[in-house]
């Protein structure tokens, strides 16, 4: 029994069992000694704020005083768009985690002041002050005992007893008013440029002779025979018929117009009337230039004068030389 057991452990092995769950989160925490921010669960587990607003509030609370937290600055810092960041800031304002005011500086410049509250009650100034540590009781110094061989000091007459002073109640120190963080001055935003007006659509071509409207209307109504997707209503047919008549007036045959309107259609055809109006307007051919009058070739005739030569003339008669000779003879006779 007195033999030492070499294989036995020298002391019991203690192991702290970690609770393992089949589901849910498991926290592995490390102690922060620098660069950390205290965030309350009222913000981290807020039931009415979006995740974007909660993350943005934590980011703003971690920034030092004077840091810029404008919408454009945050949009450059994070992948969220300016619209989502602006919506998150409005959520924080609605739940008293943020306050933004627009102020005009003496020089006329308009800036936005931003104040971040780490607790909703901080906006109304109703955060309870932190409890002060209890004051330590005052210790009365104990006089040192005189040595045994020291002569006993002469005894003085004891003073008459005096009434104990009434205790003075101590007032608790008033909490210092919490200083509001310095508000950030954001640069004035330039007004967004006005959107450019939409280009006006060119008007549909109009014919000069309205007699061919019936032919144009029949052509449009029959397009659904070539392609079932080109079904037009009566209103669209009446609106597009003058444009088709303008094509026919410029010498384009109905078959050519039908081929132009039905060839190479996209898939699917969502607005057939708008597609046909575009093609009739954009692909309208120009008018043909006027042709020069054809040269007239007169038939051959024999001169009826004295020369009897063959000449070209619209009607039979004397040639130019015979006419001049006859006129000279008449002038001499006169």
Image: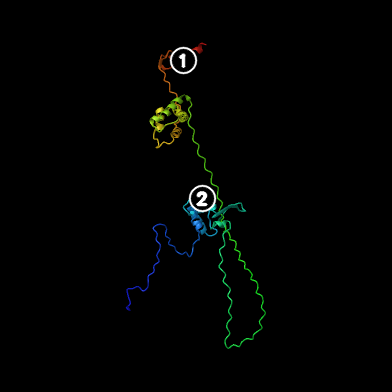
Name the spot of residue 221 as percent of width and height, x first.
42, 28
Viewer-proximal residue among 58 and 275: 58
Left or right, 290 with respect to 104, comes to: left
| Mark 1 or 2, closer to the camera | 2
Name the spot of residue 206 as percent of width and height, x first.
48, 29
Q: Is residue 19 above or below residue 167?
A: above
Q: Are dots 1 and 2 in contact, CB under 8 Å? A: no
Viewer-proximal residue among 59 and 257: 59
The circle drawn on residue 323 is: 1
Give the distance between the C-alpha atoms of the residues marked 1 and 2, in whole angstroms.
104 Å
Picture residue at 47% right of the left edge, 13% below the top: 326
Viewer-proximal residue among 146 and 218: 146
Q: How is the image coloured?
A: rainbow
Picture residue at 49% right of the left edge, 14% below the top: 327
> Would you name the residue on which mark 2 appears?
87
Name the spot of residue 220 as percent of width and height, x first.
43, 29
Q: In which quarter of the image is the N terminus?
A: bottom left
Q: In this view, does 306 lie above or below 41?
A: above
Badge 2 crowding class, 10 Å Cα cut-off, few under 14, some 14 to 19, many 20 or more, is some
Name the spot of residue 33 as percent of width and height, x first.
48, 65
Picture residue at 50% right of the left edge, 58% below the top: 41
Q: Is residue 145 above or below residue 65?
A: below
Which element carries disc 1, helix, strand or loop?
helix
Mark nearer the N terminus (1 vs 2): 2
Badge 1 crowding class, 10 Å Cα cut-off, few under 14, some 14 to 19, many 20 or more, is few
Which element carries disc 2, helix, strand or loop?
helix
Give the image quarter of residue 121: bottom right
């Amino acid at each position: 029994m007195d033999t030492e057991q070499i294989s036995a452990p020298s002391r019991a092995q203690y192991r702290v069992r970690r609770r393992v769950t089949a589901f849910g989160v498991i926290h592995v925490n490390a102690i922060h000694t620098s660069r950390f921010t205290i965030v309350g669960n009222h913000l981290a587990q807020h039931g009415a704020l979006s995740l974007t607003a909660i993350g943005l509030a934590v980011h703003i609370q971690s920034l030092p005083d004077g840091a810029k937290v404008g919408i454009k600055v945050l949009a450059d810092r994070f992948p969220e768009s300016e619209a989502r960041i602006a919506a998150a800031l409005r959520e924080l304002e609605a739940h008293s985690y943020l306050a933004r005011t627009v102020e005009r500086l003496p020089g006329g410049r308009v800036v936005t002041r931003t104040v971040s509250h780490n607790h909703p009650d901080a906006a109304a100034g109703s955060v309870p002050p932190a409890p002060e540590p209890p004051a330590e009781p005052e210790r009365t110094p104990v006089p040192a005992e005189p040595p045994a061989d020291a002569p006993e000091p002469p005894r003085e007459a004891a003073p008459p007893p005096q009434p104990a002073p009434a205790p003075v109640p101590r007032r608790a120190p008033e909490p210092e008013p919490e200083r509001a963080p310095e508000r950030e001055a954001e640069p004035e935003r330039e007004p967004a440029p006005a959107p450019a007006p939409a280009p006006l659509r060119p008007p549909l071509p109009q014919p000069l002779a309205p007699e061919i409207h019936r032919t144009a209307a029949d052509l449009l109504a029959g397009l659904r025979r070539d392609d079932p997707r080109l079904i037009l209503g009566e209103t669209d047919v009446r609106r597009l018929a003058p444009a088709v008549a303008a094509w026919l007036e410029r010498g384009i045959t109905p078959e050519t117009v039908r081929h132009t309107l039905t060839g190479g259609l996209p898939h699917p055809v969502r607005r057939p009337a708008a597609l046909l109006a575009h093609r009739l307007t954009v692909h309208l051919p120009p008018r043909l230039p006027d042709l020069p009058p054809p040269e007239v070739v007169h038939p051959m005739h024999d001169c009826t004068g004295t020369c009897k030569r063959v000449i070209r003339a619209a009607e039979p008669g004397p040639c130019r030389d015979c006419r001049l000779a006859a006129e000279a003879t008449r002038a001499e006779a006169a």
